[in-house]
Image (cartoon, rainbow, N blue to C red):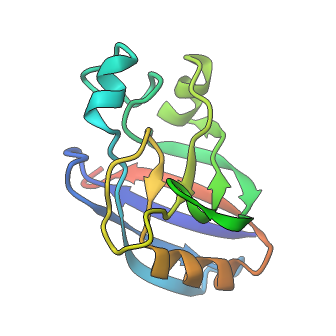
Amino acid sequence: MKYLLCFLPQDRARPGYFHLFDSHGVLLMEQVPCLGKADNARAAKAANAGRDPVLPYGDTPTGIYRPEPLVLFEAPHPRLGKGWIPMFGLQGDAATAVECGRTGLGLHAGRGDDRLVPTYGCLRITDLHFDRLAECLDGDAVEIRILEQGR
């Protein structure tokens, strides 16, 4: 099974990066920029002004996520782009987030440009990197592991 190893900074306003590996540990994508920051206004509206990752509409939680295949849309979605990878937490803050009612987390691109803008707590990459990721996954499920940089 393929896996994506993501490193996010403690300050989620700054981008992190991920590496994608095949089932044998061979590197398929390296140092792909990503953002795990929630939208401030949406988080505040959901009573999570501090963007606590385990609460709904917070920043992207660290931990291990269940392997899921990439889902492609027939037409690009205005916020999600061409598709996404659903993320359901199994371990770490990702599992705690599930217990606290977080749903709808995923990895996606969006917006049709190269800007990494905040989401509702998902992990965002550029459209170009999303296209490459879809090519590398080729329908396979991918386990996502998110760590905080420096830990």
Q: Is residue 134 left or right of residue 12?
A: right
Residue at figure coordinates x 48%, y 75% from the top left: 127
Tag count: 0
Is residue 138 toward the left or the right of residue 46 in the image?
A: right
Give me the residue at 63% from left, 67% from top.
Answer: 3
Q: Could you tell me residue 125's position as x and y percent? A: 43, 66
Quarter of image, res 21: bottom right
Q: Residue furthest top?
A: 47
Figure check: 144 above or below 91: below
* Image height of 14 relative to 126, above or below: above
Residue furthest out toward the right: 139
- Residue 23, picture quadrant: bottom right
Residue 25 percent across, percent down from the top left: 61, 80
Residue 83 to residue 46: above or below = below
* Percent x, y of residue 77: 59, 58
Of the 4 image quadrants, the one containing the N terminus is: bottom right
Relative placement, left or right, of 25 versus 115 is: right
- Residue 41 in the image, given as x and y percentages of width and height: 28, 29
Q: Is residue 92 visible?
A: no
Residue at screen point 43% across, 82% down: 30
Residue at coordinates 35% horizontally, 39% vertically from top-left?
38
Residue in front for this viewpoint, 60 or 44: 44
In the rendered view, would you say 45 is above or below 8?
above
